[in-house]
């Protein structure tokens, strides 16, 4: 910017110098024209006095023509200088206007670039804020998801423990029932062993009747029902009974 204004000042100085030169030239031309008019007046007077001498009159006429020619040449040069000065002024004005337009365009471009930079910075900041917000939300959702998974795992663990305890209790109950059933079955088998499968009387070795075991299966009958079974099938397993032996229980 300073370089442009310095260049503009130099152009203004050059323009003023050209104007001064033109004024001096115009003044010199005016003085020359005034001097020429005075000389012409003198020449006219001399002509009146020298009409009697043709040679002198011819010389005077030639000098007058040369002076008139010089005056004309000076007027032409002055017009050319004025035209050159007008052209220089117009060129300087055009250059000044072009420079001002360039300065205005550059300032406008700088303002637009600054506004674009501000807008870009605002967009970047906005994008960063949005990203931070999304990151915070994602982090929060992840923490909540972890908490939900942990709660679900704890609930599942508690439920599994409850199921395990219930299963253990059920197994223990089943074991107790099975033990009771086995005990009942054993007691039933023992009771069956103590009953005669034919007459259903209680078997006892000290009741005077006695207990007999069938051979070869070993099933027990009372002393009254055992002998008739020899040679026939056992009433319990249907095996052929070959004999019977008294046993004490």
Image (cartoon, rainbow, N blue to C red):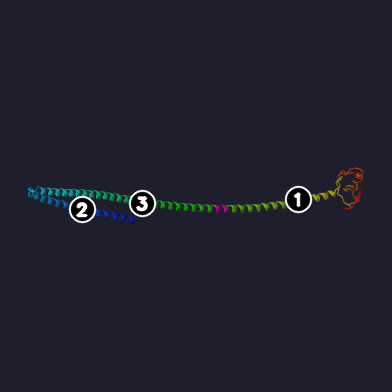
**232 lies above or below 15:** above
* Residue 206: % across, % down: 89, 53
CB of mark 2 within 8 Å of CB of mark 3?
A: no
* Residue 183: % across, % down: 78, 51
Q: Which residue is mark 2?
A: 25
Which is more N-terminal, label 3 or label 2?
Answer: 2
Task: Report the Cα–Cα distance between label 2 and label 1.
Answer: 145 Å
Task: Report the Cα–Cα distance between label 1 and label 3.
Answer: 103 Å
Task: Report the Cα–Cα distance between label 2 and label 3.
Answer: 41 Å
Residue in the picture at 25% in, 49% down? 84
> What secondary structure is marked by label 1?
helix
Labelled disc at residue 178: 1
Q: Let me know if residue 103 is in the magenta part.
A: no
> What secondary structure is marked by label 2?
helix
Q: Looking at this view, is 51 or 75 the one in front? A: 51
Which is more N-terminal, label 3 or label 1?
Answer: 3
Q: Residues within 10 Å of mark 3 (few under 14, many from 20)?
A: few
Give the foreground label among 2 and 1.
2
Give the foreground label among 1 and 3.
3
Q: Which residue is mark 3?
A: 106
Which is more N-terminal, label 1 or label 2?
Answer: 2
Give the side of residue 92 with respect to residue 231, left or right.
left
> What stretch of residues is rendered in magenta?
142-146
């Amino acid at each position: 910017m300073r370089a442009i204004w310095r260049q503009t000042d130099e152009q203004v100085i050059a323009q003023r110098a050209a104007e001064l030169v033109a004024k001096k030239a115009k003044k010199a031309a005016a003085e020359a024209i005034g001097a020429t008019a005075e000389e012409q007046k003198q020449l006219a007077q001399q002509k009146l006095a020298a009409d009697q001498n043709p040679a002198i009159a011819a010389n005077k006429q030639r000098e007058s023509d040369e002076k008139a020619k010089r005056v004309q040449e000076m007027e032409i040069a002055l017009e050319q200088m004025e035209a050159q000065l007008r052209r220089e002024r117009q060129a300087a004005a055009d250059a000044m206007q072009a420079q001002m337009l360039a300065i205005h365009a550059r300032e406008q471009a700088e303002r637009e670039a600054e506004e674009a930079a501000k807008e870009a910075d605002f967009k970047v900041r906005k994008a960063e804020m949005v990203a931070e917000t999304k990151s915070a939300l994602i982090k929060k959702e992840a923490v909540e998801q972890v908490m939900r998974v942990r709660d679900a795992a704890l609930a599942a663990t508690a439920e599994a423990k409850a199921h395990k305890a219930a299963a253990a209790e059920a197994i223990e109950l089943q074991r107790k029932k099975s033990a009771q059933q086995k005990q009942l079955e054993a007691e039933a088998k023992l009771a069956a062993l103590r009953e005669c499968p034919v007459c259903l009387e209680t078997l006892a070795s000290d009741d005077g009747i006695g207990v007999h075991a069938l051979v070869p299966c070993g099933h027990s009958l009372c002393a009254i029902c055992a002998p008739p079974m020899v040679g026939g099938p056992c009433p319990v397993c249907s095996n052929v009974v070959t004999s019977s032996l008294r046993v004490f229980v």
